């Protein structure tokens, strides 16, 4: 019984060690891939457009709202 218990514990620790090593390697691989993607494919800076930052004219908003409403009514 003691020998079976020690073999079972040994197998459990070996299995848990293998899973831990696999997960650690997975974390390292994901971090390396993330660093490579950020290095070779950096995000392009978003150009600031002063036209978009200003408020829209109320007549333009009304026209867009009417067009969307008409489109929804036609395509029910």
Image: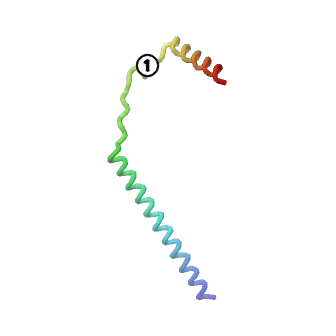
Q: Indicate the position of residue 54 as horizontal and vertical percent values.
A: 43, 19
Q: Is residue 71 left or right of residue 55?
A: right
Locate the C terminus by quadrant: top right
* Residue 31 percent across, percent down from the top left: 40, 55
Q: Nearer the viewer, residue 62 or 3?
A: 62
The residue sitting at the right extreme is 76
Give how far across and how far down residue 21 sits, in percent.
Answer: 46, 68
Q: Residue at x 52, y 13 (%)?
A: 58
**What residue appears at the point 61 percent right and 19 percent down from the top-left corner?**
69
Q: Label 1, on which residue?
A: 54
* Residue 53 or residue 71, whichever sits in front: 71
| Relative vertical location of residue 36 with respect to residue 17 in this rendering, above or below | above
Q: Is residue 14 above or below residue 28?
A: below
Question: Residue shown at 57%/84% (left/top)?
Answer: 6
- Quadrant of the snapshot with the N terminus: bottom right
Say above or below: 39 vs 11.
above
Question: Which corner quadrant of the image does residue 49 belong to?
Answer: top left
Q: In percent of the image, x 35 and y 42: which residue is there?
A: 42
The quarter holding residue 29 reads bottom left
In the figure, 15 relative to 33: above or below?
A: below
64 or 24, nearer to the observer: 64
């Amino acid at each position: 019984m003691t020998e079976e218990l020690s073999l079972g514990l040994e197998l459990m620790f070996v299995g848990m060690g293998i899973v831990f090593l696999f997960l650690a390697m997975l974390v390292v691989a994901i971090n390396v891939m993330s660093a490579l993607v950020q290095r070779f494919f950096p995000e392009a800076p978003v150009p600031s457009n002063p036209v978009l930052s200003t408020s829209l004219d109320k007549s333009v908003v009304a026209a867009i709202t009417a067009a969307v409403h008409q489109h929804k009514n036609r395509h029910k």
